[in-house]
Image (cartoon, coloured by chain):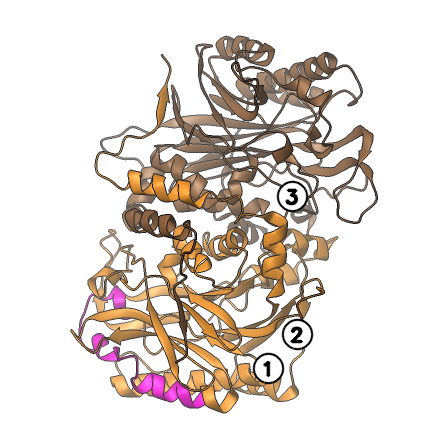
Chain colours: A brown, B orange
């Protein structure tokens, strides 16, 4: 990836600074202890050429609750084959690659693994073309879920699988995440609540906003929500997952440099803080080149790539502490060992739930959403 | 302030790095151009020993709207006299000191100046004592407003003055911000919507949550909202100010290290991003020592100071770009030259307002706030 910057953490690690630890504390709230993984996990990652990094979020011991330790993983991957290869071949190659990364995450002790948005395919929504891209859409019980079920059972892990979904009934296409239990059963699905119409992200030409709400999935390892991609820009979306009981909210994404990179470290972290939950921000990585030129209607020449997906996946705790980002240029697995007791400890300390005046905002938003809403503006008289 | 760290920006400025500019771009989204001020302004700041820094936020030229340039300032100050000095003397000394800082901000071209939370007094809410602290409370038209009105007229500036308010009717105490027009008239007041009960921040023993909503003030230089201190932890609070038309939202605060510093750079910045507005985060600076010991009920010994107020005021644009922080240890004025056209340009590009599904969240929050709300939880069957 020559020419692509390696990212903030690499630059800071190379810098000569008087007080490196203090800089990291300012940036990340705390210096989280790095996790050590079995040799087998590290060797697999090294052999296959992806990053494997992990950090520990600790809570204070309590008298009446035992620590509730869970290891979560986010996986950021590139596509494997060229985008003009046969659809099944592209998909199966990604399956194999990500299957190896899931293997490494499981060897590193992960209990819940979340993949990136639309992980089985190139992020072709920039093209506005239908075929062959809509052929990547699958039903919730399609080949991808069948592939992952085996891994879930083999390792006793929960897998969150964000796919392009073609539903069983109307054959409508959705942007969906399937949650697969450690038993191999599908617990359920959730869909993207907010859809972008930004630059090359012509996604509203492919699917519409979810109408199935903000489901939270009770897994063997904790209650999880999935806020897909552009939903991270909407604080209300995160809040609803928390109100429904989520302890960990995953944000499987696909976003490129020059667009969102100033926002990326802020939004998922703010959501963890505001809602007393853990968040896992996962972004696709690499550059994808498409067979046909497309434009963004922004005056720039037609092009065949979408820009660089900058990876940089990271995990944040409810106290605002966060991990560094994993690679900006290559594939990787980010692992967090979370003590879920930290959520309630932070909640009891900061008290944002107690002080949030939810009924007031429910009423105000309902008023503000109506046509003819009169803004509360005060003028000099 | 020996022993107190000077903060992230000072450490980074001293570091030897391969690509300093790239690090700043990752951290702050853009490298904003520094403003140059008249000698008179710089000399005043230097003579009086406070920082004066400013940055420019630019927008793309439009055909039908001229640039809407406004300079805003946030002022972070220490108390001047010891906390056992007579109340009037403490207050008047702060008036004089901040009056000088307002002078410098006006010389630097500021149109709207916002002071820190409860700026006329030590932040005594940690003590739980009534007298003499409640004597700092004033009516909206009290001595502080009279003092500021003259400065507003003299410089033709808008001043936002967060005070401890004693209201005219029931003599209830509130945490209030008074908005003074460039004409010297009071445009109106707003009050703190969310009140902390965190550690030494025993503020709910002094005042209650505002019941006057989320007013936005139409000034000669733009529409402003004021989200006082702990209200920054509540994304819904920021959103209501934006829904009421705010273009700039000030966050006058008082917060200390060891508590909120991991959250400080995130929340006001996220609010600017999520709402397509400018935000100005202003924090008190210095350490305040009180006559009598107090405790936080946290097992630590009784103490007479609240910790270090870490300053670090900063400004964020709607595109997520932000200024560095001003000093972590000394007083200062942060100035931003804003082109308010950037708000709508960012709104039209990202479209968060278009995609926010406000009616949905109004309904959901109303449901979730009711006793017996049933969470949307999906379990393996």
Question: What is the span of residues highlighted in magenta in the rendered image?
Answer: B124-151
Judge depth for marks 3 and 1 and give the one in front.
3
**Distance (Cα) linking label 3 and label 2:** 32 Å
**Circle 2 SS class:** loop
Q: Position of residue A101 (x, y in %)?
A: 62, 20
Report whether residue A318 is seen.
Answer: no
Q: Is residue B347 left or right of residue B268?
A: right
Q: Is residue B135 a member of the stretch shown in magenta? A: yes
Asked if the residue under mark 2 is in contact with the one under mark 1, i.e. CB atoms within 8 Å, the reply is yes
Tell me the subunit letter for badge 2: B
- Identify the image quadrant of residue A99: top right
Question: Which residue is disc 2 drawn over?
Answer: B35
**Circle 3 SS class:** loop
Question: Which residue is disc 1 drawn over?
Answer: B108
Q: Position of residue B159 (x, y in %)?
A: 44, 79
| Residue at the image point whose x is 38% and y is 33% from the top | A247
Q: Is residue B221 left or right of residue A2?
A: left
Q: Position of residue B262 (x, y in %)?
A: 46, 52
Furthest toward the left, the residue is B170
Q: Is residue A296 a member of the stretch shown in magenta? A: no
| The N terminus of chain A: image quadrant | top right
Asked if the residue under mark 1 is in contact with the one under mark 3, i.e. CB atoms within 8 Å, the reply is no
Tell me the subunit letter for badge 1: B
For label 1, count other residues whose C-alpha is less than 10 Å away and answer few (under 14), some (14-19) or many (20+).
Answer: many
């Amino acid at each position: 990836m020559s020419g692509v910057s390696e990212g903030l953490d690499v630059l800071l690690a190379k810098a000569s600074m008087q007080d490196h630890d203090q800089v990291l504390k300012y940036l990340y709230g705390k210096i989280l202890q790095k996790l050590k993984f079995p040799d087998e996990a590290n060797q697999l990652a090294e052999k296959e050429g992806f990053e494997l990094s992990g950090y520990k979020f600790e809570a204070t011991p309590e008298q009446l609750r035992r620590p509730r330790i869970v290891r979560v993983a986010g996986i950021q991957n590139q596509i494997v084959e060229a985008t003009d290869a046969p659809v099944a071949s592209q998909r199966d190659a990604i399956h194999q690659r990500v299957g190896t990364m899931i293997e490494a995450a499981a060897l590193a002790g992960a209990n819940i693994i979340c993949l990136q948005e639309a992980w089985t395919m190139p992020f072709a929504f920039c093209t506005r073309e239908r075929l062959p891209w809509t052929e990547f859409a699958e039903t919730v019980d399609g080949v991808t879920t069948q592939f992952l079920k085996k891994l879930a059972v083999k390792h006793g892990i929960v897998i969150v699988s964000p796919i392009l979904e073609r539903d069983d009934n109307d054959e409508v296409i959705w942007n969906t995440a399937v949650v697969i239990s450690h038993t191999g059963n599908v617990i359920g699905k959730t869909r993207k609540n907010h859809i972008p119409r930004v630059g090359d992200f012509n996604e509203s030409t492919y699917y519409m906003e979810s109408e199935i709400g903000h489901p939270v999935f009770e897994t063997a390892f904790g209650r999880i929500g999935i806020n897909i991609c552009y939903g991270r820009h909407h604080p209300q979306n995160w809040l609803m997952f928390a109100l429904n009981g989520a302890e960990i909210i995953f944000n499987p994404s696909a976003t490129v440099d020059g667009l969102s990179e100033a926002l990326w470290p802020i939004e998922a972290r703010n959501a963890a803080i505001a809602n007393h939950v853990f968040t896992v921000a996962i972004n696709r990585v690499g550059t994808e080149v498409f067979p046909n030129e497309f434009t963004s209607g922004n005056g720039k020449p037609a092009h065949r790539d979408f820009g660089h997906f900058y990876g940089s996946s990271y995990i944040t705790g409810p106290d605002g502490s966060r991990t560094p980002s994993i690679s900006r240029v290559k594939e990787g697995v980010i692992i967090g060992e979370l003590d879920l007791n930290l959520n309630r400890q932070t909640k009891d300390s900061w008290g944002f739930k107690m002080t949030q005046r939810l009924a007031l905002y429910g009423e105000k938003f309902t008023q503000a959403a109506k046509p003819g809403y009169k803004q509360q503006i005060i003028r000099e008289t």
